[in-house]
Amino acid sequence: MSRIVAIDYGRKRTGIAVSDPMQLIAGGLTTVATHELLDFLAGYVQKEPVERVIVGLPKQLNNEASENMQRVEMFVRSLKKRLPDLPVEYVDERFTSVLAHRAMLEGGLKKKARQNKALVDEISATIILQTYLENKRL
């Protein structure tokens, strides 16, 4: 099987997570500068078989699109142009940053490490992907 890539898209930085080849477990891959994201993904899919990309859907608590939604949609359009054979799906990303901070706290990370926004983005992408993988199994 091939991997699934998940993206926690941000204005400056984007967290990236990938599944194992059996698509059972999500793991953080890296955080990249958003302006380098398309090149990074294009390079990654050349090295690893990727089945699809999961993108965090930024919504507010009232279920309306957040201010980041336009940037996410522009990115997805660019991604589909660059990698047209790669399916893209959305997963609700509400509370992923809160869950990422909680996971860091429960994991025993020191305060300085918990303030690392790049790590928060990577963990958020991992949570988005794990949510997708678990829902896929239902």
Image: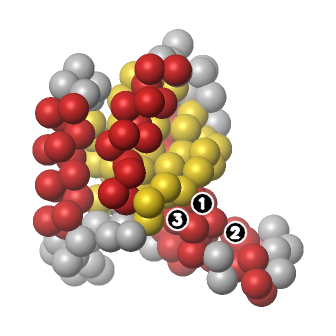
Q: Is residue 68 left or right of residue 135?
A: left
Decide: few, some or many residues near mark 1? Use Cα within 10 Å; few <14, some 14-19, many ≥20.
Answer: many
Taking the spot 63% from the left edge, 66% from the top edge, the residue there is: 119
Tell me which numbered mark, 3 or 2, is placed earlier along the sequence: 2
Residue pointed to by mark 2 = 103
- Res. 131 in view: no
Secondary structure, mark 1, is helix
Q: For the point 25% across and 28% down, which residue is it? A: 83
Q: Examine the image and state in which quarter residue 123 appears.
A: bottom right
Q: Tag 2: Cα neighbours inside 10 Å, few (<14), some, or many (≥20)? A: some
Which amino acid lies under the numbered mark 1 shown in the image of this protein? Ile
Q: Is residue 44 above or below residue 114?
A: above
Q: Position of residue 18 (x, y in %)?
A: 55, 38
Distance from label 3 to label 2 (Cα)?
A: 12 Å
- In the image, taking residue 27 as reference, residue 108 lies left or right, namely right
Amino acid found under the numbered disc labelled 3: Asp
- State the separation of the CA atoms marked 2 and 1: 8 Å
Q: Is residue 96 above or below residue 131?
A: below
Q: Which residue is mark 1?
A: 123
Labelled pair 2, 1 in contact (Cβ < 8 Å) = yes
Per the image, the residue denoted by label 3 is 121
Residue at image point 28% right, 67% down: 58
Tag in front: 2 or 1: 1
